[in-house]
Amino acid sequence: MGQPVRDYLLTLCVTAAVTYLLTGPVRKFAIAIGAMPAIRARDVHREPTPRLGGIAMFGGLCAGLIVADHLANLDSVFDLSSEPRALLSGAALIWLIGVLDDKFEIDALIKLGGQMIAAAVMVLQGLTILWLPIPGVGTVALTQWQGTLLTVALVVITINAVNFVDGLDGLAAGMVLIASAAFFLYTYRLWYGHMIEAAAPATLFTAILMGMCLGFLPHNMHPARIFMGDSGSMLIGLVLAAGAISVTGQVDPDTMKIFEGSERQATHAMLPVFIPLLLPLTIIAIPAADLVLAIVRRTWNGQSPFAADRGHLHHRLLEIGHSHSRSVLIMYFWSALIAFGAVGYSVHSASMWIVLVIVGLSALGLILLLMPRFTPRAPLWAQRIVPPRYRRRRRPAGEPAASEGGAERQQGPLDAEMESERQEEAAARAPIAAGVSGVNGATAIGPRSRFADRRKADSTRR
C-alpha cells in the first residue's frame, strides 16, 4: 500500500469543493422557504441571514465518502470496517433533525432524543468504544452496555459543545477545522507511521470534516452570508465525535509495539501518546469549557441548563471591547494552541521546548485578551492583501501632513474604505440588549428564549 496522503488530500479537496459550490444554491433555497428569521434585539448579526448551511455540508460529506470509496489507498477502509456506513447513517439522522429545527424550531427534548438515537444507530453498526487504556491499570475492556452509554454520552457532549460556540460568524466552522486538522495529524501518524489499520477510519473522518468546514467558511466568515444552523453544527459535532470514538475505542495499545514490558507498564508509559485518545475533548477544549460554564451559570441562576443566554465566551469577548473578527481570531488562537499542543506533547512528551512554546504562546494570548482596542497594521508590502481595517492610513499625493486652522483633510478612496470599516466595527462593539445570540448562536438542545434580559430568560418556547 502506497502512502495515502495524496488520496486524503484529494478527498479533502473534493469535499471542500462540493460544500462550497452547494452553499450558494442552498442559501437561495433557504431564503425561498423562509428559513431566514427577522432580526431581534438579542441577535449579534445586523441583518436577516438565512440558515440551513448544513445541507451543503452534508452534501460534502456524502461526496467525500463516495470519492474515498473509489481510491486505491482508502477503499480498504470500506471493505474492512463498517464505521463509514455507521457514520453516514448517524449523520443523516442528525442532519435531518437539524434541518427540521432550522425551519420549524422543534422541541429541545426531541433534539436531545434525536442525538441519542443517532449515536445509538452508530453503535449498532459497530462504531463504539470497546476498551479504554488506563495508566497504571492497563487496557480495560468495556461491556456492551458500558461502551454504548459512553459512546452516546461522548456524541451528545461533543455535538452540544460545538453548537454552543456557534455564536459568531465563522467561529464554529473554524474551530472544528482547527480541531480536525490536529486530530488528523495524530491519527495519520498512528495509521501510516505505526501501520495500525484501526486508525484508518478516524483519519478518513477527520479529512472529510476538514473539507466540510473549509468549503463552508468562505460563505460564513464575517459578515456571514449564510449560517450553518443546527443542521450544520450538530452534523460536524457528530463527525468529530465519530473520529474520536473510532480511534479511542478501536486502537489497542499492544498493537503499537513501541514499548517493552507488561501491558500495564506499556499503557502507563504511553500516557502522553493517549492524551488525544483518552481525552478527545481536549481537541475541542474551548467548546467543552464553554458548555460546562454555561450549565453551571444557568443552574446557579435558577434557569434550565438548556435555556439559551448571552454569557458564552465569545459574547464575553465582545463585551470587553473586542471586535467581531478579533473575537473569532482569539478563539481560533486558543483552540489551535490547545489542540496542537496536546498532539505535539503526545508525540514528544520529553521535549522541554514544546512546553516552553506553549507557555510563550499562552502569554501572547493573554496579552491579546487584554488589548481589545489595539488594531495591528500590516506592513507596506501587504497592504493590498489584507482587509482595509489593517491597512496603514495614506494621504493623497501633494496634500500637506496637517491642514491649517484645523480644517479636515480630504479623504481618499482608501481612507473612505477604512472609515467605513471603522464604523462597522464601532457598530459591532455597541452594547446589545442581553439575551441569546442569533440563529447561529442557539444551543443544540436549547430553545431560543424570547426574553431580552438574560436574568429573566427561561426555557419557555416561542
Image (cartoon, rainbow, N blue to C red):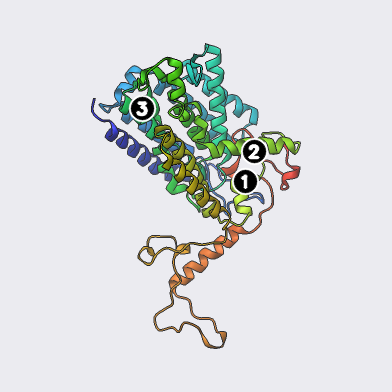
Q: Where is residue 436 drawn, in percent x and y?
A: 65, 44
The quarter of the picture where residue 19 lies is top left
- Nearer-the-camera pick, 207 or 107: 207
- Asked if residue 39 is positioned above or below residue 443 in the image, the reply reads below
Please identify the quadrant where the N terminus is shown.
top left
Residue tagged 1: 437
Query: Which is more foreground, mark 2 or mark 1?
Result: 2
Q: Where is residue 199 drawn, in percent x and y?
A: 38, 24
- Asked if residue 102 is positioned above or below residue 410 in the image, the reply reads above
- Badges 3 and 1: C-beta atoms under 8 Å apart? no
Q: Where is residue 389 drawn, in percent x and y?
A: 48, 63
Residue at screen point 38% across, 29% down:
187
Within-10-Å neighbours for mark 3: few <14, some 14–19, many 20+:
many
Residue at screen point 52% across, 32% down:
281
The extreme left residue here reads 2
Give, as a three-letter code, the residue at label 2. Answer: Leu
- Give the mark, 2 or 1, whose residue is nearer the N terminus: 2
Cα gap from disc 3 to disc 2, whole angstroms:
33 Å
Give, as a three-letter code, the residue at label 1. Answer: Ser
Residue tagged 2: 293
Residue tagged 3: 190
113 horizontally vs 54: left or right: right
- Give the mark, 3 or 1, whose residue is nearer the N terminus: 3
Query: Which is more foreground, mark 3 or mark 1?
Result: 3
